[in-house]
């Protein structure tokens, strides 16, 4: 529900980040963010302790960007600066 709420509230300004985990629930929420014009970041399954959730998001075509865990934080900072916000 978190991603769905963010998508509805922020439309194209929403950013969903899928990290290590099991199941597929986050992939569905990320789909909603992307349908509303937002951006999807998914952890590279090779760097995930539990890769099932990132794999599901990637397989469903929900990722705009697939990054290793250490790359995600700096990327989000760059994304915020591009949009005129301070990280």
Image (cartoon, rainbow, N blue to C red):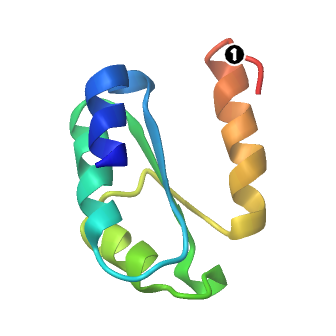
- Give the labeled residue for mark 1: 85
Q: Residue 47's image quarter?
A: bottom right
- Mark 1, other Cα within 10 Å: few <14 / some 14–19 / many ≥20: few
The residue most toward the top is 84
Q: Residue 12's image quarter?
A: top left
Q: Is 62 drawn above or below residue 77 in the view shown?
A: below
Q: Residue at x 31, y 40 (%)?
A: 33
Question: Could you say whether the residue bearing mark 1 is in a helix, strand or loop?
Answer: loop
Report whether 56 appears left or right of 40.
left
Q: Is 44 drawn above or below residue 28 in the view shown?
A: below
Percent from the top left, x then y, of residue 41? Answer: 50, 53
Q: Residue at x 37, y 22 (%)?
A: 10
Report whether 25 appears left or right of 86.
left
Q: Residue at x 68, y 12 (%)?
A: 84
Q: Residue at x 74, y 36 (%)?
A: 77
Q: Is 82 drawn above or below residue 43 in the view shown?
A: above
Percent from the top left, x then y, of residue 3? Answer: 35, 45
């Amino acid at each position: 529900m978190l991603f769905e709420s963010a998508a509805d509230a922020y439309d194209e300004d929403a950013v969903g980040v899928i990290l290590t985990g099991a199941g597929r629930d986050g992939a569905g929420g990320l789909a909603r963010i992307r349908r509303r014009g937002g951006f999807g970041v998914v952890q590279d399954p090779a760097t995930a302790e539990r890769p099932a959730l990132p794999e599901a998001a990637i397989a469903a075509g929900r990722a705009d960007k697939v990054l290793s865990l250490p790359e995600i934080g700096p990327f989000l900072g760059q994304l915020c600066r591009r949009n005129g916000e301070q990280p």
